[in-house]
Amino acid sequence: MPRIGHRTRPDSLASFPEHSPESPLSIHDMTVAYDRRPVLWDVDYEAPAGKLVAIVGPNGAGKSTLIKAALGLTPMLSGRIEFFGEPLKARRRDVGFVPQRESVDWSFPVSALDVVCMGLYSEIGWCRPVGRRARERARASLAQVGMQGYEDRQIARLSGGQQQRVFLARALVQDARLYFMDEPFAGVDAATERSIIEVLRDLRTRGRTVLVVHHDLQTVAEYFDHVVLLNRRIVASGPVAEVFTDENLRKTYGGRLTLLDRAAEELARAVEPGAGS
Amino acid sequence: MSAAPAGLWDVLLLRGGYNATVVQSATLLLGAAAGSVGAFALLRGRSLMGDALAHATLPGIGVAFLIASAIGLDPRAPAWLLLGAAVFGVLGVGFVHVLTRSRRLSEDAAMAVVLSSMFGLGVVILSHIQSLPGGNQAGLRSLILGQAAAMRTGDAITMGVLALICALGVTLLFKELRLVCFDGEFASARGWPTGAIDLALMALVVTVTVIGIQAVGIVLIVALLVVPPASARLWTDRLWRVVALSAGIGAVSGYVGAAISAVVPRMPTGGAIVLCAGAVFVVSLLIAPSRGLAASALRLARLRVRIGREHALRSACEWLEERGEQVENGARVPVADALRAVEDWPLWRWFVRISLRVRRFARIEGAEFVLDLRGASEAQRISRAHRLWELYLERYLHVAPTHVHSPADLVEHTLSPELVAELERAVDAERSSMNGAGGPR
């Protein structure tokens, strides 16, 4: 692959074939445990540049944990993570994060614009107030997710989908090169889903890489280029067309049970708790 | 105290003498600092930590007194006692942290254990001190409930300056505290040292608590950290306003409370200050717009009147349609039929009638309910929304028709026009797909 605009690497570095400098994220040998119970086993992964990647797997497969460990939010038992060939510390500016919507208290007394401005705090630096230019950029970012006119709305007065878009705008305003998004499509309305898709495609056009924890298997092929099938370990990863097969899905979601069986079981449990298991 | 007992107004207007003026100004600053630091502590869920910390300071004061007596220092020097208090306060927070981190106890249980056992230890040490010769005059008891009037000018100035520094710290770290209190995980992901910012907040809480001990006392200092921000939160949805208002409420409470305790004999300052803050809280709870009790009672009452009004219009509409009559301006329905579904409580009925009249929906003439200018279209709108909602429940949620009526009754009154339009589309789509499946295309 020709690397236009990149400095040629010194030969000493070229002797590490497993991480090319283009890879926005490489995970080596990651193992994570909660209370000595392993959640992720021996994960090795190299994210492709400029692609939309879905991370898919059953509940408790460690999808969020993968993201959090990569971002240094959850300690690892072992493993090495590199962003664009460097440790996270050197590349924070290029790494954006959209947490799960449920991870914060939405009754917190801030406006939508206040939240989006938080994406610029690192640029603004310690002890300095949020200036007018930062607010302008935050405003533009809100408009990008179709939220103009909601700047001064207290965040509790936004719908779930609008809250999700505020989180998205907060990440976008940072203009990172790699984004992690934890379940951005969970429980959102149709307008929000369209808006998120539009944003994702725009990011891809601009050569950004996005890793999305996704729960809706129906839309994986439509929305994403690559997929990571995860269940405590990586079952398969690669282009959707090659990897997103029934065989691999069966492996990911447990050999014996088909998806339909699982859905039926869940329904039975929802109707009559305690039955079925 | 000065020779002539000063009145409350004199003291409030700073005519109570030099020392009283300094002490009051210092409690004002203390209140402002506690209010602003407390706002973030409350939002970070650390309020009770302040309480555990404050109670943990008591043995520190006792130990500091004993050490000073043993090595021949002046054991009553406030700076020395407060140093002991600070050390034990931090120790208490450390204990809570250790107990919680090893997951042996939940945080509230850990705080309760540390708070009560360290306070108990403090009480034991204090009673030992009182049994010592000269211990009675130590005046340590006043630290439990606070006695601002007994503060010396120099101590008050120190307290004021430290309070000012705390308030300044909150101002400087405003942005960082907001970020960490709202979304600590995002803050960490962006490289902010969340632990250090939390520690800074804790340091501010420790400082406010310790400097407030002389004036407000160990038992009540936490109220100054919690009550002003809780009151301020009722008034506004903006963080900087919450912090500023909380500082203001704290400052006024500190000032007025110190004045009251200076005038009323043997009134502990802590109690007076906290009572002032508590009064502000009660008033806020009652009258704050949108979050106050009065506002929500008013909202509820308006909703009930609206439901009654819509019930009356729908009943009238249905009555007319059953008889094949036009739903139009001037249409007449017997009052008993129109108000059939309205709650049978004279006051509500009266409100409903007034509301119908004022909005030009309907008026009551003798025993007849007469649809007015805007009433006919409103009645049709309501009936339609009701039917759509019933249809939707039946078709999509498969609720049995006999069960539909009552839940639909409650929801339909709050349906927005957009939602009604969406319902219409959904029901229409269903209808056309059913038609399409039957016939050839």
Image (tube, coloured by chain):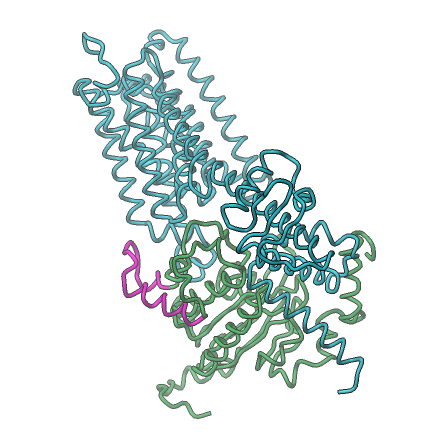
Chain colours: A green, B cyan
Residue A31 pos. (x, y %): 59, 64
- On screen, residue B399 versus residue B11, left or right, reads right
Q: Camera-side residue: B179 or B319?
A: B319
A100 is higher (above) or lower (below) than A198: above
Is the residue B45 above or below the residue B190 in the image?
above
Q: Nearer the viewer, residue B263 or A62?
A: B263
Q: Where on the picture, by quarter, is residue A213?
A: bottom right
Residue B26 lies within the magenta run: no
- Span shown in magenta: A120-145
Q: Position of residue B19 (x, y in %)?
A: 19, 20
Give left or right: position of B14 versus B262: left
Task: Pick the residue in front: B48 or A201.
Answer: A201
Estimate the x, y position of residue A161 in percent, counting from the top left: 53, 63
Image vertical order of residue B412 relative to residue B111, above or below: below
Q: Residue furthest bottom?
A: A2
Q: Is residue B230 left or right of residue B345?
A: left
Identify the image quadrant of the N terminus of chain B: top left
Rendered position, A212 above or below B191 = below
Quadrant location of the C terminus of chain B? bottom right
What residue is shown at x 26% (from left), y 40% (from top)?
B165
Total number of numbered labels?
Answer: 0
Magenta segment includes A122: yes
Dominant SS of magenta comes to helix
Q: To which quarter of the image does residue A53 belong?
A: bottom right
Q: Viewer-proximal residue, B281 or A88?
A: B281
Of all residues, the one furthest to the right in this rendering is: A276
Q: Residue at x 62, y 78 (%)?
A: A237
Q: Position of residue B240 (x, y in %)?
A: 34, 48
